[in-house]
Amino acid sequence: MIMDPKAPSIDLSYPFTGRWLVQNSPADRVPSHGTTMFASAFAIDFVPVDETGKSAPYTVASFFRSEAPETFPGFGRPVLAPLDGTVVSTVHSEIDHLAHRGLPSIGYAASQRGRVAGGWMSAAGNHVLLESGGIVVAVCHLQQGSISVRAGQRVGAGEVLGRCGNSGNSTEPHVHLQAMDGRDPQRAHPVPIAFDGVLPRNGTVLKM
C-alpha cells in the first residue's frame, strides 16, 4: 500500500479520562504496528495505567502465567468518542481473554498470524466504527457487553462508547484507535491522526 506523507490528518479528542500510556504511536514509526493490513498504518494504542504509570502490578507469577483481565486496574474504564460522528457499526460479543505478559506473551505472539488470518473482526475484537465527513474512526478491544451505542446513532465527542477491554488481538487491556477513508478496514486506506494538533510519542503518559 502506498502512503502519502502529505495526506491530511484528522484531528481527534483523546478517548478517555485518567492516566493512559501511549504505545505503537505513528509519531515513532509508520506503519505504527509493523503492518499496513486493515488500514492500520497510522493506528495508535493507549494502555490505562495507575498513578505510578503501571498497567498492573508485575509479579513473579506474571512472568510465568497468563492473567485475568480483571486484575488490571484499567479494565472497564470508560472509553469515549474521539469525535462527533455517526455510529457505522458495533461488535460487542467477543470475549475478554486472558492477558499475556512475560513468557506467555511469547506464545501469544507466535499465534498472532492465525488471528490476523481471521480478518478484521478477529483482530479488532469488540469495537465501534464512527464516521464523520467521509472518515471512519475505529475504537477497538472494548470490553464484552459494554458498548452503549448502536448503529445509526449520532454521538458527540466525549460521549461514552463502552469500556476498556481485552478482546481481539490484545495482550492486555487497552484501546486501539485508527482512522481510514472507508467503512471496510480490509479495503480502506489509512488516514493520519492527531489529538488536538499533537501526536504523542511512545512512552508518554497522558493525564486527562
Image (tube, grey):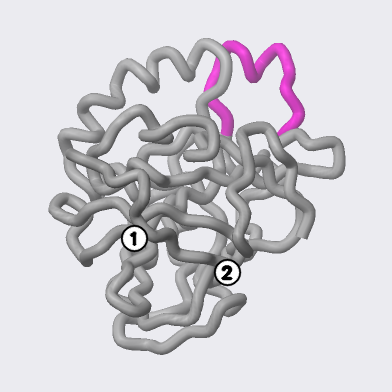
Q: Is residue 196 magenta?
A: no
Type of amino acid under label 2 = Leu
Q: Nearer the viewer, residue 156 or 66?
A: 156
Type of amino acid under label 1 = Ser
Q: Nearer the viewer, residue 94 or 30?
A: 30
Dividing the image into 4 quarters, which one contains the C terminus?
bottom right
Q: Which residues are magenta?
A: 56-67
Question: In the rendered image, which quarter is residue 108 located in?
Answer: top left
Query: Disc 2, disc 1: CB below 8 Å?
Result: no
Task: Kindly identify the residue that appears in the image at 30 percent across and 43 percent down.
Answer: 123
Cα distance between the residues tagged 2 and 1? 19 Å
Residue found at the far front of this picture: 6
Please state if 39 lies on the left or on the right of 49 as rendered: left
Q: Which mark is residue 93?
A: 1
Query: Residue 29 at what x, y percent from top left?
Result: 46, 30
Task: Kindly identify the residue that appears in the image at 28 percent across and 75 percent down.
Answer: 134
Q: Which residue is mark 2?
A: 80
Query: Residue 5 at what x, y percent from top left?
Result: 35, 44
Please state if 5 lies on the left or on the right of 195 as rendered: left
